[in-house]
Amino acid sequence: MNRTLALASFHSVSTISNWSVTLATAPRLSPPFLSIQLRRPSLFHLTPISHYTKKLSAVLAMDSSKACSVKELPVGLDEATEEEYASQSKLLQEFTSISSIDKAWIFKSDSGIGSQAMFSISQPNLLANKKRKFMLSSSISKESINNVNFQWAPFPVEMTGVSLFAPSPSGSKLLVIRNPENESPSQFEIWSSSQLEKEFMISQSVHGSVYADGWFEGISWNSDESLIAYVAEEPSPSKPSFDDQGYRKGAIKDKECSSWKAQGDWEEEWGECYAGKRQPALFVINVNSGKVEAVKGIAKSLSVGQVVWAPQVEGTEQYLVFVGWSADLRKLGIKYCYNRTCALYAVKAPLYKSEAAEFDLKSTEESTVVNLTQSISSAFFPQFSPDGKFLMFLSAKASVDSGAHSATDSLQRIDWPTGGKLCSSTKIIDVIPIVNCAEDGHLPGLYCSSFLSKPWLSDGCTMILSSYWHSCQVILSVNVISGKVLRISPADSDFSWNVLTLDGDNVIAVCSSPIDVPQIKYGCLVDKANNSTGWHWLNVSSPIFRCSEKVMSLLSSHQFSILQIPVKDVSDCLTKGAAKPFEAIFVSSKKNDGTDPLIVMLHGGPHSVSLSSFSKSSAFLSSIGYSLLIVNYRGSLGFGEEALQSLPGKIGSQDVNDVLTAIDYVIEKGLANPSKITVLGGSHGGFLTTHLIGQAPDKFVAAAVRNPVCNLSSMVGITDIPDWCYVESYGSNGKSIYAEAPSAEHLTHLYNKSPISHISKVKAPTLFLLGAQDLRVPVSNGLQYSRALKERGVETKVIMFPNDIHAIERPQSDFESFLNIGMWFKRYCQ
């Protein structure tokens, strides 16, 4: 910092205006030093500097005081926008602080009257940049068909440092697992209702961290609650060691300073979210002794997950059932990708025997692993019926066979052998087949992201699950014998519903909308005695989703609807399903007269869906003055397989046209101002966004993208899902022509399908939000596009999150993203 002080006020020198004194702050010099700069030296008479010491000190003190009062603004802000920035950040914090329910469990109370519920809740901790996890319990008493009472605990209990927890089937024990952040042991705790009963430290030489990713993750108690099967990283392989004499024989400790370990052979990983994670393997722990046994007989090439205990048949061996993913040449990215071949396997479990009241695990010899689903290309989420007669599972066969990263699911059943003799040629029964094109009002297909740990009603053959139904999530009951499917959440509701857990034959669920924070609901069969199919839903008062009066007031001033958008060029549709209308969720102020600025919001995938559920970030954007048009273009989940499969091979054209059709629809209805339209998308939504501002450059005043796909020809060589680039660009044929070394012809085709091929036409100022650790759409894609825009004189802004991956979901990063999106759009919608 340099500051020049004119000494004209110093009366002793008549020509002092030709002098200047510079106060310079030099690194590590305190106090600042003085340098005298002389101008026109022949015209002055110099008075000794000591004469001015006191006056100079006073002037410097005055200047220093003024400098301290000058506010240094953050980069990108000026005084005019700082107040708006502060106001928006405060409001966003109020939205961000709203809690979410992750899981719930129900246990029968000790008195036999009523039940106990336990809710796992999370809340962003912005200061720590982590999710805060805590538990909240409640006593439930159902007093009548029209009255249920939840008596909540006065305070939740924070689960600090907890990676996973799993109650035992009876509810008498709770397993708590704390994964280490370094090479320390994993910590297993067994809790009773009142105290810690057991604590075991599992060394890294046994296994690494326990998987808690929601996909490979699997924890299963056996029936007598003495054993737990789970999935963890296999122990680190032995690597060559060296010291000052060269190669060193024998194992060394990791922290020996006189030697070092070589890197060893590089091993393939499962891409995004799994960088640095070792192969998932299967283990069993005895909760009495703490002894851990690796399950033998599973091929090294098989990644395992989602383990469950098979029903125990007296006189036969005990089996574990798990999902196995095989990888031949390469492990392609598996996060969000259901098109990876997988199967259900059964393997003999390590056994125990009772001798003098002590339990010991016995290692099984190399046992045969039985593939239970050889006749189908995909099988996951195994779930046994209460009586052990059926093994249910989901299949993403449509996804695996077509190459689309996600598609319509099917629900399958295997009749479990009563004698315990397993066979790889077991018959697989379609309970809910793949739906290609449903009639109006009928199930559009099964789109289920998970099963409950206990999804069964008391009849033992009815499962309760959640599924996407167009732009909503709904709750279904499925009779696994007859295949009868019923929508049990209200059919006339545009809200989204998600089942949390079952209380006997009653359902505890949560429902929400884009303008309604989640609400716990309690569902009861209207007339269970007469096999009624009607369900009655009760409101449950809960402290979980409480938010500020300001947030509630803002939300109550808004409205939403689900729009049916007719396909523009039906003649181009090859299937009936592709010709059906698609949907868009429209959120606006109740006073909207078509003048509010509009944000067009586009989901990624492309085979995912934007649901009519509460989103804190979307609610924030609508609350600061924007209408939202959330488009579920053809290719989205929830609309049948024909509509979904109409998109691969047509990205950059069909999806772009669907979005433009939706925009024109709301403009024609007088719902949006055509001069104030912005567009926002991430991943494939970013692909669509950058296509739109290139193909329709006069339509949008601004754009924002999160980790966008901008150039498929450069992405294909560095992404963890190169097959995605082929399938979405070529259609299902892309699965067979995909190659690790694309030909020049393929690269040209990929480039022509990319937004960067339209970059010369782009006018819209564009905000880029990029995760530096993204393996899915590496950061170079967004940077190349942003630099090319800047080169052409288009205004851009780039925010880089150094520790974020594809989703940009770390609390601080997500917060900063949407705060900047709100400010960016406001700047161009004035």
Image (cartoon, rainbow, N blue to C red):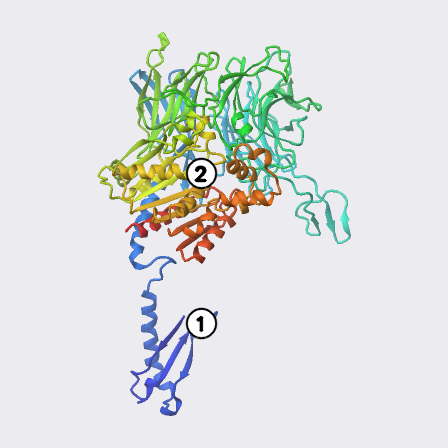
Residue 146 image point, x, y percent: 29, 17
Residue at the farthest front position? 571
How far apart are labels 2 and 1 at the CA level?
A: 54 Å
- Indicate the quadrant where residue 265 lies: top right
Q: Is residue 135 visible?
A: no
Give the residue type that dot 1 points to: Ser
Residue 156 image point, x, y percent: 39, 33
Q: Is residue 756 above or below residue 205?
A: below
Mark 2 in CB contact with mark 1 (< 8 angstroms): no
Q: Is residue 746 above or below residue 731?
A: below
Left or right of residue 681: residue 83: left
Q: Is residue 509 visible?
A: yes
Residue at the farthest top position? 530
Out of 404 and 131, give the one closest to the viewer. Answer: 404
Left or right of residue 473: residue 550: left
Which residue is drawn at the image coordinates 33% and 11% (left, top)?
Answer: 527
Give the residue type that dot 2 points to: Gly
Residue density around tag 2, few if under 14, some if 14–19, many if 20 or more, within 10 Å? many
Quick one: SS at disc 1?
A: loop
Left or right of residue 788: residue 327: right
Q: Is residue 404 above or below residue 256?
A: above
Which residue is drawn at the image coordinates 72% and 45% (left, top)?
Answer: 240
Q: Which residue is mark 1?
A: 30
Residue 411 image point, x, y percent: 49, 20
Out of 565 and 534, give the one closest to the viewer. Answer: 565
Q: Which mark is residue 604?
A: 2
Out of 82 and 660, give the one closest to the viewer. Answer: 660
